[in-house]
Image: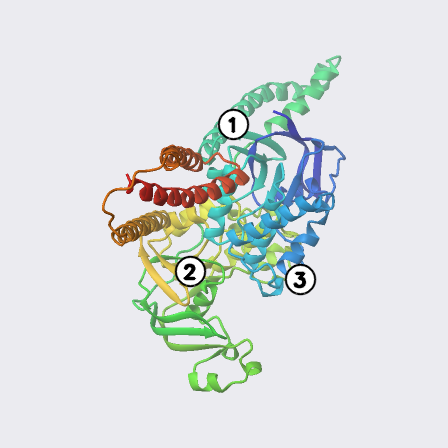
Amino acid sequence: MASYLQIENISKSYGPKVLFEHIGFNINEGDKIALIAPNGTGKTSLMRILAGKDKSDSGGRIMFLKDIRIAFLEQEYEHDPQKSIMQQIMEHSSEFTKNLDQEHYWEYERRVKKLLTNFRLPDPEQKLKELSGGEIKRVAIAEMLATEADFFIMDEPTNHLDIDAIEFLESYLSRARCTLLMVTHDRYFLDHVCDMIMEMDHGAIYTYKGNYENYLEKRDERIANRNAETDKVRNILRRELEWMRSTPQARTGKARYRINAFYDLKDRASQTFAQKQISLAEVQGASRLGTKIINCKDVSFYYGDKCYLDHFTYNFQRYEKVGIVGRNGAGKSTFINLLTGDYTPDMVCTDPMEYQEMTPEQRAGKGLLTGIIERGESLKIGYYHQSGISFNPEDTVLDTVNDTRLLNRFLFPHDMLNNKVGTLSGGEKRRLYLLTILMKQPNLLVLDEPTNDLDIVTLNILEEYLKEFGGSLIIVSHDRHFLDRLADHLFVFCGDGVIKDFIGSYSEYRAFIKEYESQQKAGARAEEKAARAARNAVGTAEKKPSPAKKKLSYKEQRELEQLEKDLGSLGEERARLEADLNSGTLPYEQLQKASQRIGEIIAETEAKENRWLELSCMV
């Protein structure tokens, strides 16, 4: 396999903090690699260096294979809110399209529009200012995939996507014959797409083949072996320390190299390689929770002409853990804002008549809320917002949370306590934000997309804590693994204010939906077949009987024989194409062609069957 990327001697520091130093690695054609590291260790910095947006402190070399097409997906997509989706994509990708002839330029446009449709953005002329954050992310991904690049480099591609979009992207990348390097915290996505994991640990790079579970096992083996080696070094160090402590006269004439070797041993003996982990054991449990949590009776919410909640009635129970899923823009965040009362009076109107009489200007930024939402007197809500909170960037970590013990437990060691919040990575800020919420001992935790920007290690520990949390839990999340481990049941936002309650895990829900859709398609096919047979029967019955069967002409006989051969060939071709589609190995372009060809075969088969039936009735 050709080497697509070679990196040598790359380093990056911010002030006294060393992210990585003199690292190097190689990526070959066809590799699909997930890059894993704790927040704040330089994953995004490395991605920015590869994209040419930043530079290595130590020089070094970054060598991409000549003439391969490379596409980058950064966490933040640069865009102009005033432009349409299509205008933004075509102008943003001008470096890619400038050398295309007219035919290939049109083909790129067609791919973009097809991908936008797959991501449920069917209107390419819609203004970007009208889109949600998740929809903007889908625009960025559609632009990237449409290039059909040889090498995709992606930083947190699933952040802000809803689950439908994640599953489409997952399916696309798992089938595509591309090379891939991505940072992700989504463990299901990682396992379904990647065949290799690259870890940044203590400034070095380690590579593991296989899935996430295999990575954890092999990583533990590596750390255990390294620490065993350190123990041997310490035994040697004790002997050398006795020699060093001997009188200067005893060392006279001793080789200088032995003294130098002692200091080298001392450095190696001080290295203990163990994964730092967040421990939530020191965070006190939930406050006492009464019998009444949140009771909703006939609650509806309208914003403009759109219904986000339609006559919703439900009483939340003590200790229940509910997951909330649905497409971007379905109203999930609006729903939990209403539940928690996280809105100001000027944001809602509770009188339908008053709302109807408002002018469009008066209605701007205001929704109509009807029904009853009651909250228990002992309820203490901890609300983790998707947007986070605005820290004072000049405050230190210790200013924000004045508890060194807890800060240490949350991977903020002593040497970070005086760091300004403005210098922290996105994940470190999220971790600090989470700590400020848990410290208040809420008895109802409401988490809106808590997995965004958190590393996998932090997520694993957070999951363990939430499983034992002594209060009620409401989670809005696109992380399927996170939902499967925590949610007892799901509120599924179906659109137009409709919410369905599904008892079970997210994986069980998806299996149910796929089975239901399969049954619906089978039923539709059966109905169509019956209707076609009925039409053919009616057509046959309406034919005027002839005194004697007409003998086929020589030409018609040959046509009948050819139809039988053609129908057999079409059936074989359709079977081959369906097998290819089910194999999951077709590149996306061939997948499109195969799907289109199957549609053509179905139409052609129906026409030939009708003609065959007509000729057969004449024999």
Give the distance between the C-alpha atoms of the residues marked 3 and 2, in whole angstroms: 39 Å
> Which comes before the other along the chain, label 1 or label 2?
1
Circle 1 sits in a helix, a strand or a loop, which is it? Answer: helix
In the displayed structure, 279 sits above or below 241; it is: below
Q: Are marks 3 and 2 in contact (CB under 8 Å)?
A: no
> Which comes before the other along the chain, label 3 or label 2?
3
Residue in front for this viewpoint, 289 or 105: 105
Residue in front for this viewpoint, 289 or 541: 541
Which dot marks residue 372?
none
Residue in front for this viewpoint, 249 or 315: 315
Q: Nearer the viewer, mark 3 or mark 2?
A: 3
Q: Amino acid at mark 1?
A: Arg
Circle 3 sits in a helix, a strand or a loop, which is it? Answer: loop
Circle 2 sits in a helix, a strand or a loop, which is it? Answer: strand
**Image quarter in which the N terminus is found:** top right
Q: Which x, y percent locates residue 146?
A: 60, 46
Which dot marks residue 445?
2
Left or right: 31 as drawn, with respect to 188: right
The answer, for residue 15, to whether it is visible in the render is: no
Which dot marks residue 222?
1
**Image quarter in which the C terminus is found:** top left
Which dot marks residue 83?
3
Q: Amino acid at mark 3?
A: Lys
Residue in front for this viewpoint, 91 or 617: 617
The answer, for residue 236, to whether it is visible in the render is: yes
In the displayed structure, 390 sits above or below 6; it is: below
Which residue sits at x=40%, y=52%?
Answer: 466
Give the distance between the C-alpha atoms of the residues marked 1 and 3, in whole angstroms: 51 Å
> Which comes before the other along the chain, label 1 or label 3?
3
